[in-house]
Image (cartoon, grey):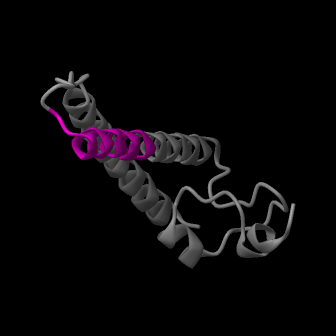
Amino acid sequence: MNESQLAGFRQRLQTLQEELQSLEETAQRGSQTVTLDQSSVGRLSRMEALQAQQIALDSERRRQRLLQGIAGALRRLDSGDFGFCFVCDELIEAARLEADPTTTRCIRCADSPG
């Protein structure tokens, strides 16, 4: 992989990282605890509120996993290990990295059980 390609991956990862961090800040401001007046809110409204809260928590977990993957990819770029499979140490196909620059396994190792 040449320097231009690596620089492109770095820029893409940093942009995605900034977008996710901004989204996380917005989500944190919007996820302040809401106190429901149980006497005026129906059972369905409470269930909807609980469901919305669970969806927000799931989104937060997905954002955190993606941020961790991005941080790992940036570390691999810095160390020169970016684009190499964690399992077999072979180059990961460029198309696979284009689809997901945080990937750590080549397609063969990703498809292998265990």
**Which residue: 53% across, 40% down?**
68
Of residues 39 and 84, which is closer to you in this image? 39
**Which residue: 77% across, 54% down?**
86
For the record, the magenta segment spans: 41-59
Give the percent coordinates (x, y) of residue 8.
40, 61
Give the percent coordinates (x, y) of residue 9.
45, 59
Instruction: Describe residue 23's horizontal placement relative to residue 78 as left or right.
Output: left
Of residues 98 and 46, which is closer to you in this image? 46
Of residues 52 and 89, which is closer to you in this image? 52
**Which residue: 51% across, 65% down?**
100
Of residues 21 and 29, which is closer to you in this image? 29
Instruction: Describe residue 6's horizontal placement relative to residue 82 as left or right.
Output: left
Q: Is residue 3 magenta?
A: no
Instruction: Please identify the quarter of the rendering in which residue 93 is found.
Output: bottom right
Give the percent coordinates (x, y) of residue 57.
41, 39
Q: Is residue 30 above or below residue 101?
A: above
Instruction: Please identify the quarter of the rendering in which residue 52 is found.
Output: top left
